[in-house]
Every structure is written in C-alpha cells, then in structure tokens.
C-alpha cells in the first residue's frame, strides 16, 4: 500500500545553466507542491502504513530550509530545477523515512516531476 503527505512552500530561484534569453534564467518564484509517498504493509493493529504525523515531522526541517528562501543559495541546489529539487529532497528524506517510494515536486499546476530514487 502507498500513502502520501502533501506540503507546500514558497521559494525563489533562477536557472544558471539555461541560455541568457530563457525566462527561467532570471529570478522568479513558485509555490511548490511536494508530495512524499511512503510504501509499506498495512499495520493490522494501527490500521495504517505510517503515521501521517511522522511524515510531517520528517518534512519540517526541510521546510525551514526551503520556505521563503532563494533555492540557489542552498548547498546542493545551485541549479534548482524541479528535477534537482526532487533528488535533493529524496536524499534528505530517505534516511529518515525508510519506506519512501516517490517524491513529487510541482512548480505549478501543470509542471512537475516524480522521482523514485533512480539515481541512488
């Protein structure tokens, strides 16, 4: 079974490696949506895969790092594409949340990425 917990945060960024005339080369911001997916067995006594509060507890330190910040200033996010942000989040969350199965990051309602740990 797979559950998810969704979070939002607001950050600014620019993409330093795109052409000079690309709109994302310049500072802009997003209200990001992040979903952390956790897979596991349904605990017959508790009736859940994982306590949603536990997922929230894992997310909170990352939210303090990301929310209302310039992503480019964060170590490991110097080129903060949605893809790189998803990998960065995975690497921070996975050691704390063993059943992590996917990280979804959306920059807006129509653009996002799903990372399943393919590069680990």
Image (cartoon, grey):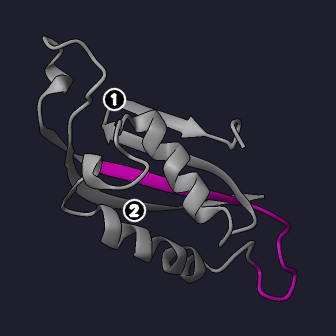
Q: Is residue 104 something that shows in the picture?
A: no
Q: Is residue 28 something that shows in the picture?
A: yes
Q: Is residue 21 left or right of residue 77?
A: left
User: What is the quadrant of the C terminus in the image?
Assistant: top right
Q: Answer with mark 1 or mark 2, whichever residue precedes in sequence.
A: 2
Q: Residue at x 36, y 51 (%)?
A: 33
User: What is the quadrant of the N terminus in the image?
Assistant: bottom right
Check disc 1 and report the residue beneath it.
110
Judge by depth and name the residue closer to the eye, 92 or 105: 92
Secondary element at image label 1: loop
Q: Quadrant of residue 44?
A: bottom right
Secondary element at image label 2: strand
Q: Residue at x 84, y 79 (%)?
A: 43
Q: Is residue 118 left or right of residue 114?
A: right
Judge by depth and name the residue closer to the eye, 25 or 115: 25
Residue at the bottom extreme, as displayed: 45
Residue 2 x, y percent position in the rendering: 71, 57
Check disc 2 and report the residue beneath it.
7
User: Dot 2: few (<14), some (14–19), or many (≥20) neighbours within 10 Å?
Assistant: some
Judge by depth and name the residue closer to the eye, 90 or 103: 90
Is 115 magenta? The answer is no
Magenta residues, as a range?
32-47
Q: Is residue 90 left or right of residue 9?
A: right
Q: Residue at x 43, y 53 (%)?
A: 34
Q: Does 82 sit above or below residue 35? A: above
């Amino acid at each position: 079974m797979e559950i998810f917990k969704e979070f939002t945060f607001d950050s600014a960024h620019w993409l330093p490696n795109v052409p000079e005339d690309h709109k994302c080369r310049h500072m802009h911001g997003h209200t990001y949506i992040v979903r952390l997916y956790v897979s596991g067995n349904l605990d017959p006594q508790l009736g859940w895969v994982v306590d949603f509060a536990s997922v929230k507890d894992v997310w909170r330190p990352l939210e303090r790092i990301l929310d209302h910040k310039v992503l480019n200033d964060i170590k490991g996010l110097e080129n903060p594409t949605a893809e790189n942000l998803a990998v960065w989040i995975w690497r921070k969350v996975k050691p704390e949340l063993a059943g992590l199965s996917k990280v979804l990051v959306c920059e807006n309602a129509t653009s996002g990425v799903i990372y399943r740990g393919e590069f680990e």
